[in-house]
Amino acid sequence: MTHRARYTISFLPTDTDLIKHLDNIKAQTTVSMYVRALIRKDLDNENTPPNIDDVVEKVMKKLNSKNAISIPLQSNEPEIKINEEQRSIITNLF
C-alpha cells in the first residue's frame, strides 16, 4: 500500500495575486498537479535559488550601513531583527 504525503500551504492576505493565479490554474488542472510540476521543474533547474534568509540579512545590513533606514537592535544583539512585514517586502523584490 502506497502512502501519500500531504502538505498544507497558507497564503497571506496580501497574496491576492497568488490566489488569483491559483484560481486560474484550477480551471485547467488541479493545484496538486501544478505544484508537483513546479517542484519537478525546480529539481531539474541547475541554478539553485539563494537562501532567502541570507538575502534578507544582506539587504538589511546594506541599508543599515548606508543609513537608509534605522533598525533598532534589541538587547545589544549584533543581529538585525526584522518583522514579517519587512521580510515580506524584501522577499517580494526577488
Image: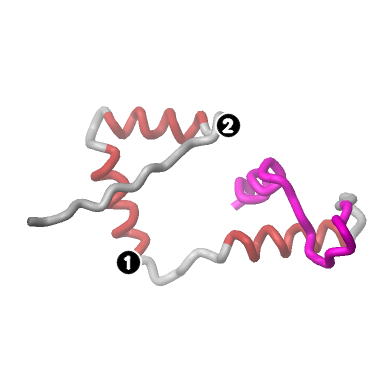
Instruction: Name the dominant secondary structure of the magenta segment.
Output: loop
Give the labeled residue for mark 1. 44
Does residue 88 appear left or right of residue 27 in this picture? right
Q: Quadrant of the N terminus?
A: bottom left
Does residue 17 appear left or right of residue 31 in this picture? right
Does residue 52 appear left or right of residue 80 in this picture? left
Q: CA distance from mark 1 to mark 2?
A: 30 Å
Q: Up-down: is 65 above or below 38?
A: below
Task: Confirm whether the magenta stretch covers residue 31.
Answer: no
Q: Amino acid at mark 2?
A: Thr
Residue at image point 61% right, 50% down: 91
| Rendering colour mode | secondary structure
Q: Which mark is residue 14?
A: 2
Q: Up-down: is 16 above or below 45?
A: above
Residue 28 is situated, as x and y percent measured from the top left of the image, at 23, 32
Residue at image point 49% right, 32% down: 17
Q: Secondary structure at mark 2?
A: loop
Q: Nearer the viewer, mark 1 or mark 2?
A: 2
Of residues 5 and 14, the one drawn nearer to the viewer in this rendering: 5
Of residues 11 and 62, the one drawn nearer to the viewer in this rendering: 11
Does residue 3 appear left or right of residue 88 in this picture? left
| Neighbourhood count class around disc 2 (C-alpha, 10 Å): few under 14, some 14–19, many 20 upward | few
Q: Amino acid at mark 1?
A: Asp
Which contiguous range is marked in magenta?
A: 72-94
Q: Which quadrant of the figure has residue 64?
A: bottom right
Residue at image point 40% right, 33% down: 21
| Neighbourhood count class around disc 1 (C-alpha, 10 Å): few under 14, some 14–19, many 20 upward | few
Q: Secondary structure at mark 1?
A: helix
Residue 62 is situated, as x and y percent measured from the top left of the image, at 81, 62
- Extreme-bottom residue of the structure: 46
Q: Up-down: is 84 above or below 19?
A: below
Task: Confirm whether the magenta stretch covers residue 82.
Answer: yes
